[in-house]
Image (cartoon, rainbow, N blue to C red):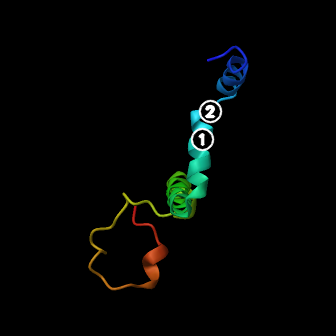
Amino acid sequence: MTAATLPSVMATDATEENPWARAWRRLKRRKGAMVGLAVVVLFVLLAIFAPLIVPYDPIATSWTAVRKPPSWTHGISYS
């Protein structure tokens, strides 16, 4: 390497891209990866906000009412 090319090599190394930024740029180029990321983010948001979305307690199940047909008492709590 000559002295004239050394500063240009040093300048490119100093401005090397962050690995996370490079990974994000590559991810954005792939449509399938972005769809998968959107699905994962949706599931995470559903898990975080589950108590607000579904007001029924999954633990408080009336095992006597499991085999009965649907009725108007569905909304009544059996606790």
Secondary structure type for disc 2: loop
**Image spot of residue 18 (x, y percent):** 62, 32
Please state, as top left, top right, bottom left or bottom right, where the N terminus lies in the image.
top right
| Label 1 CA crowd tier, 10 Å (few <14, some 14–19, many 20+) | few
Return the mark for residue 18: 2
SS class, disc 1: helix
Between 34 and 10, the one lying in front of the other is 10
Q: Which part of the image, by quadrant, shows the C terminus?
A: bottom left
Would you say the residues marked 2 and 1 are in contact, meaning their CB atoms lie under 8 Å apart? yes
Q: Determine the CA span between mark 2 and mark 1.
A: 6 Å
Numbered marks: total? 2
Residue drawn where x is 44% and y is 60% of the image: 57
The tag on residue 22 is 1
User: Where residue 64 sits in the image (x, y, percent)?
Assistant: 27, 72
Q: Residue at x 27, y 68 (%)?
A: 63
Residue 2 lies left or right of residue 66; in this view the side is: right
The kind of residue on which mark 1 rests is Arg
Name the kind of residue labelled 2 in the image.
Asn
Image location of residue 50, percent across then percent down = 52, 57
6 over 39 or under it: above or below: above
Residue closest to the eye, 59 or 14 = 14
Q: Dot 2, how many residues are within 10 Å of its Cα: few (below 14), some (14-19), or many (20+)?
A: few
Expressed as whole percent of the image width and height from the top left, the position of residue 62 reads 32, 67
> Residue 2, which numbered label?
none
In the picture, residue 28 is in which quadrant?
A: bottom right
